[in-house]
Amino acid sequence: MLLIICGFLSHAKKDVLYYHKAGISSQPVVSALFLPEMPSNFQMRPGTSTIFNLAYFTGITTNITLGSHMTDIKNLRIHFYGVQGSGSIFPSRAERQVTQLHSDLQLLQRVFDDLGEHVDADGKLSVSLEDVIGGSPDRDTLTRYRNSLDLEEQRSYGGWTTCCRIETSDGYDIVIDCGSGFRVCAGDIVDKWTDTEDRHLYILGTHAHYDHTEGFDQAAVCFDPKNNIHILANRTYLRSLDQNLGIFSHYIDMNLKGVQTPLTYELMPARFDSCEIRDLQKDPAPADPDPMIGRYHDVNEPIELGQTSIQPIEVFHPNPCLAYRIEHNGKVFIFCTDHELRWGDDPDDPLQIASEEAEQRLIQQSMNADLMYRDGQFLRIEYDGQQGIGTPIGVSRKGWGHSCIEDVMEMAIQCNVAHTMIGHHDPNRTWSERSWIDEILVRKSQQTGLKLELARAETVIDL
C-alpha cells in the first residue's frame, strides 16, 4: 500500500518539476506523458496560450495558465526566463533520475513520519490506512494526502539563455536581453496584452553576443503590427539585430541575408525603434543621420520610464557591455551579466585597469540594493586554469569576460545587497556541482544575513 501511495504521489508532481524548472515553459506544465488521456471536454481559454485543468490530473483545484500574468504589483515584478551562459541546456537523464530519487526519498520520509504519528506502543498502526490518508485510496484521496505533506520542490537547473522581464507598478513592460528565454517571455507579454490597444515594450540590451540576442526572431511580440518595440542598447547590440533582420534601417547586406535567420523586417510587422546608449561626452553623436539609430542617450544619464529610473553602467567584457541599475519607488534591482573582474599579473595592464574601474562603477551603483543578478560563471580555481568544468583539463579563462563566484559573493557582502542571484551559469557545469555551490551559498547566507543563491530559470521576485 505504501509503495502505491509513494509511487503515484511522487510521479504526479514529477513532470511539473522538470518542465517548469528546465525552462521549457513560462509556467509549470503538466505533461501528458505520464498522465491520463486529455478529456474530451478540454478547452482553451481565449487570450491565453494553454490551460491545463490540474484538478482533472491531480486533484489540485487550481488552473495553471501558461502565459498568464499576475496582478497587484507593488513596485517591481522581476521574471527570470533565462539564466544560462553561452548556451541553453536541458537536464540529462542521469540528472533527472537523481532529482526523481531525491523527490521519492523525501516523499517516503514524510509518509513514514506521518505513519509514526499513528502507531501504538508495539509499533503497530492504531488506525486504518484509510484513516491515515483520509479515505479510500483513489486518485483524489491520494492526491489530497500527498499535498498535505507539504513537500519541498527539488533543486533543478538549466534552461534558456539570458532574458529578464520587469513589470512596474505604473504599467511599463521592460525586458533585459533577448537570449533564447525571450521566446517564452514574449509569449507571456502577448497574453498580457490581449485586451491592450496601446502596446509598448522597452528592451534593454547588454551586448551583442549571440546568447543574448538569439531569441529575438522567435518572439511573438515581433509579429503583431499593433506592438511598439523600443530597443535601447549600445551600438554593437543594435547592429547585431539590424544587420541580420534590418528592423531599424530596412536594409540587409545580400551577403548576410538568410545566413543566420530566414526572417527579415519584411516578415516582422511590429514597429521597431532604436536608441543608442553611448558616452556622448567622450563620443558625441555624429552630425549625419544614421539609418540604424533613431536617437541617442548619454550613458552617464538615467533613462526615465514613468516612475522607473534606469542607469546604464559600462562593465568589462570583450564585447562592449552594459549593466543596469533599475530603481522604482526606492526599490533597486541591479542586472549585471557578462562582466569580468580580471585577475591579471600586471596591475599596469590597461585591461586590468579597465576591469577594476568597471568593478568600482558597479560597486558604487549596487550599494544597499534590494536585488542583484550578476554573472558568476567560474570558480576562481577554474578561472586560473587549475581545474576544468565538466572535464579534467583546466584552461585559463582570463579574458573570457566572466567573473568568479567568490568575487560576486565578496562584492555582494561589501555592497550589503539584500538578495543576490548568481547567473550566467557555465553549460558544462553538472547539477551536482551546482547543488554543491548552492549549499555553500546557503551557509554564507546564514553567516551574513544576506541571501545568496544560484539564479534559476522561471523565478519571479516581487520588490
Image (tube, grey):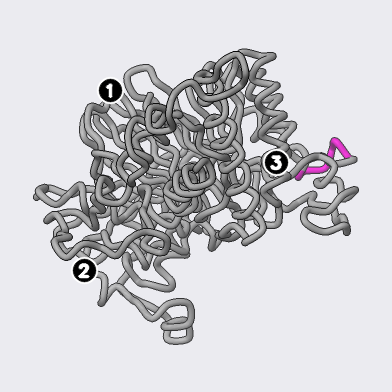
Q: Residue at x 59, y 57 (%)?
A: 91
**CA neighbours of label 1 inside 10 A, class few (<14), some (14 to 19), many (20+):** some
Query: What range of the chain is rendered magenta?
Result: 346-351
* Tag 1 and tag 2, C-beta contact below 8 Å: no
- Give the Cα distance between marks 1 and 3: 32 Å
Tell which of 354 and 135 is nearer to you. Answer: 135
Tell which of 451 and 135 is nearer to you. Answer: 135
Vertical side of 276 occupied by 144: above or below: above
Q: Secondary structure at mark 3?
A: loop
Q: Quadrant of residue 374?
A: top right
Residue 347: in magenta span = yes
**CA neighbours of label 3 inside 10 A, class few (<14), some (14 to 19), many (20+):** many
Q: Secondary structure at mark 2?
A: loop
Vertical side of 329 occupied by 18: above or below: below
Residue picked out by circle 3 = 403
Mark 1 and mark 3 lie on one chain; the one further toward the N terminus is 1
Q: Secondary structure at mark 1?
A: loop
Residue 280: in magenta span = no
Residue picked out by circle 2 = 269
Q: Is residue 236 left or right of residue 384?
A: left
Tell which of 406 and 444 is nearer to you. Answer: 444
Main SS of the magenta part reads loop
Task: Residue at the far bottom: name it.
Answer: 254
Vertical side of 346 occupied by 29: above or below: below
Q: Nearer the viewer, mark 1 or mark 3?
A: 1
